[in-house]
Image: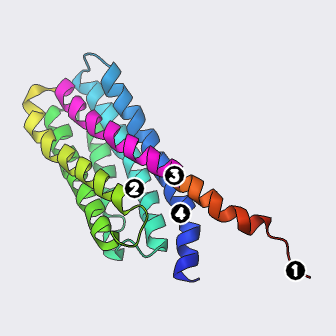
Amino acid sequence: MSAETAGMTAMPALWRAFLVHVAVAGAFGLLTIFWGQPSVHVMSVAGGLYFLGLAVAVYLTEQSLRVQGAMPAWLTRTVPVFLAVAGLLNLWIHRDSMFAQTGALALILMGVVYLIVWARNRRKHPAARDFLLVGIVTTLTGVLLPLFQALGAHALLGVAGGGAVISAVVLVLAALSYRHDARETAGPVSQAKPVN
């Protein structure tokens, strides 16, 4: 399979992975907006499920990037594993410190990996700018979480939810654009008639 063919077949997988990320981040972001006074238990369960959902979305994204040769092999599965561990720890231990510290570690790692993907592909991959934006937002969210630990669940959810909403907005626009491009590319090929 040529690099061009691999890229064309992987783009639908990428926009689908982005939509999974959008669904996870959007649901978490809406919860943080509309839940007025969340307890530490609400934060831990919602945060745990959010990190587990992100682990799935990032895994799907990494699989698409690997097919395209846009993801270093040594980085694959690192972020999903850290996100999954953070999710399980938060579902098990309900403390502000657990959410702030595990969330910070997992989100900073995710943001840095996305920035690495951007740096490697900034001139050749159509989604490079999206990885830059999401990488910056995710890294900043991770850096801010421990600073708000003393303010409790409401503040922590506000910080994490704000980052989730921004990421969801960036990625939904990207996913819809790539979906449209994939249909435009597939259209002429599927409509072509065989020559006798």
Q: CA distance from mark 2 to mark 1?
A: 42 Å
Q: Amino acid at mark 4?
A: Met
What range is drawn magenta here? 153-177
Residue that protrudes farthest toward the right in the picture: 196
Q: Is residue 63 left or right of residue 9?
A: left
User: Is 146 placed above or below 4 here?
Assistant: above
Circle 1 residue? 195
Foreground mark, 4 or 1, reads 1
* Mark before the other along the chain sequence, 2 or 1: 2
**Residue that label 2 marks:** 58
Q: Residue at x 24, y 21 (%)?
A: 39
Question: Residue 109 location in percent, x, y?
Answer: 23, 57
Q: Which residue is mark 4?
A: 11
Q: Which is nearer the eye, 184 or 50?
A: 184
Residue at the image position 85 percent from the left and 76 percent from the top: 194
How crowded pointer 1 is (Cα within 10 Å; few <14, some 14-19, many 20+) is rated as few
